[in-house]
Image (spheres, grey):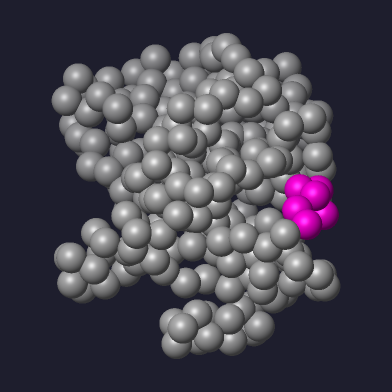
Amino acid sequence: MVRKTMFFCALIFLLPALAIGELVADGDVVKDSDTGLMWQKVAETGMDWEEALAYCEAISIEEYNDWRLPTRKELLSIIDYAKNGDAVTADAFGDTQAAKYWSSTNYSSSDPAIFSWYAWYLDTADGSLDSEKKWEATLSVRAVRGGQNEELADNIFITSPEMASTWMGGGLMPILWNIGKTKTASDVKISISRDGGGSFDVIAVETPNDGVYMWEVTGPLSDECVLKIEPQDTGDAGLETTQETFSIGEDSCDLFGITVEMKDIIRGLQILVGQ
């Protein structure tokens, strides 16, 4: 209860940073135009943490089968703290009753036992966070897809492009990634999909796994772009990642486009020259 109270107080000061994007219901899913995430509209109930993980990985909704249990940060992105009522989830979900939702985030602790025993959950009665023992509590579950799972620290993690960003065709843009625990001596393959992950075209068959690739953005234009980076060393199998979704817009006379931050461009150039 003390942890929950402290977290709720901290959230009061963070409200401007946690402003939700445009959440729109579309059939059995809810789409977030700000984060690029897609959510299960109707949640399930009565699962412990391991059951929640397995459920999200097994379901298929709207012909998508790459669902996962969201992180606590992702769960916070669908809370509307300006709402009054039993549930403070965004209106697009249609929730009428508050519930406690499992996250994939382990409770941080220097004690390995506590780290492995507890996971964070979100209470939609007030938008607060707390933790429960993974095998004792039976909570609700709302699956998410898109983006990258920040809990998979060993995997490659794409930092540019960001979800819901727009890159301009004709611009020279830095694709940036953290290599995780993949081998720096090996190569990676970089591919792009313009149909939400249905099919991919290769951007680079083999490029060094050094965290940067300068790409001259090509068409066709799309609002459903997905980027995939796959390590080519067989010892790194399963450590690939995909970043979805972002957009490729109309050509621009600006060499670097207009939406990628200058710090990313500078960092990309620094890596290229070995600084």
Where is residue 226 drawn, in percent x and y?
58, 28
Please name the residue shown 68% across and 63% down the image: 98
* Vertical side of 188 occupied by 263: above or below: below
Where is residue 28 drawn, in percent x and y?
73, 32
Displayed quadrant of residue 161: top right
The answer to whether residue 123 of the structure is visible from this angle is yes
Please name the residue shown 75% across and 22% down the image: 221
Which residue is nearer to you in this view: 110 or 154?
110
Please name the residue shown 25% across and 24% down the image: 237
- In this rendering, would 107 be left or right of 73? left
Where is residue 140 drawn, in percent x and y?
55, 52
Examine the structure image and report whether residue 94 is included in the region drawn in magenta: yes
Please name the residue shown 19% across and 20% down the image: 234
- In this rendering, would 34 be left or right of 113? right
How many numbered marks are there? Answer: 0
| The residue stretch that appears in magenta | 91-96
* Vertical side of 39 occupied by 86: above or below: below
